[in-house]
Image (cartoon, rainbow, N blue to C red):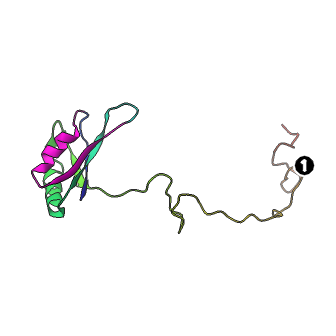
Amino acid sequence: MNIFVGNLTPNIVAEDLRKAFSEFGEIISAKVIIDSATGVSRGFGFVEMADFNSAQDAIDNLDFSYFQGSIISVKEAKPTAKPGNKGYGNNAGGARPLKPKTFPRPGGYKPGGYSKPGGESTGGYNNKNY
């Protein structure tokens, strides 16, 4: 089970998380998320535990506990959608499905621009009313 650990102080490293969670069971991985621009911790990390019951025990015991200078938030990590994978309908590749083009366009093409009822121009490149 993957566990989210939030509100970490900037000096906490993955080994600190590994030590804290190892009391409850086998740790598969532990990582603290680092900001690529600054090289500083973003204040959260993830711990993956081998056993579901051990992970639940760790969540129950460590959530809202004091850990190296701050009260941490510990909960089950939820998967998120990856950027570019918006999943429109059956198209999970990220791009929106194309709408068919209709030609000629409704209203037709007007070289002088489109105008509102009463002759008032809506603007555009051909509009002389700057």
Magenta residues, start to end: 11-35
Which quadrant would the N terminus be assigned to in this image?
A: bottom left
Q: Is residue 98 magenta?
A: no
In the current view of this chain or complex, which residue is farthest to the top? Answer: 38
Q: How many marks?
A: 1
SS category of the residue bearing label 1 = loop
Q: Is residue 26 magenta?
A: yes
Q: Which residue is mark 1?
A: 112
Which quadrant would the C terminus be assigned to in this image?
A: top right
- Where residue 5 appears, as percent x and y from the top left, is 24, 48
Residue at image position (22%, 41%) is 14
- Where residue 36 appears, as percent x and y from the top left, is 39, 35
In the current view of this chain or complex, which residue is farthest to the front? Answer: 28
- Where residue 66 appears, as percent x and y from the top left, is 14, 42
User: Is residue 53 left or right of 115 when viewed as pictured?
Assistant: left
Instruction: Identify which amino acid the numbered label 1 is placed on.
Output: Gly
- Where residue 117 appears, as percent x and y from the top left, is 85, 57
* Camera-nearest residue between 106 and 42: 42
Residue at image position (35%, 58%) is 79
* Camera-nearest residue between 58 and 60: 58
Residue 101, by quadrant, is bottom right
Residue at image position (16%, 37%) is 68
Q: Within 10 Å of the Cα at label 1, are there few (<14), some (14-19), or many (20+) other Cα atoms?
A: few
In the current view of this chain or complex, which residue is farthest to the left? Answer: 23
- Look at the picture and state if 69 lies above or below 54: above
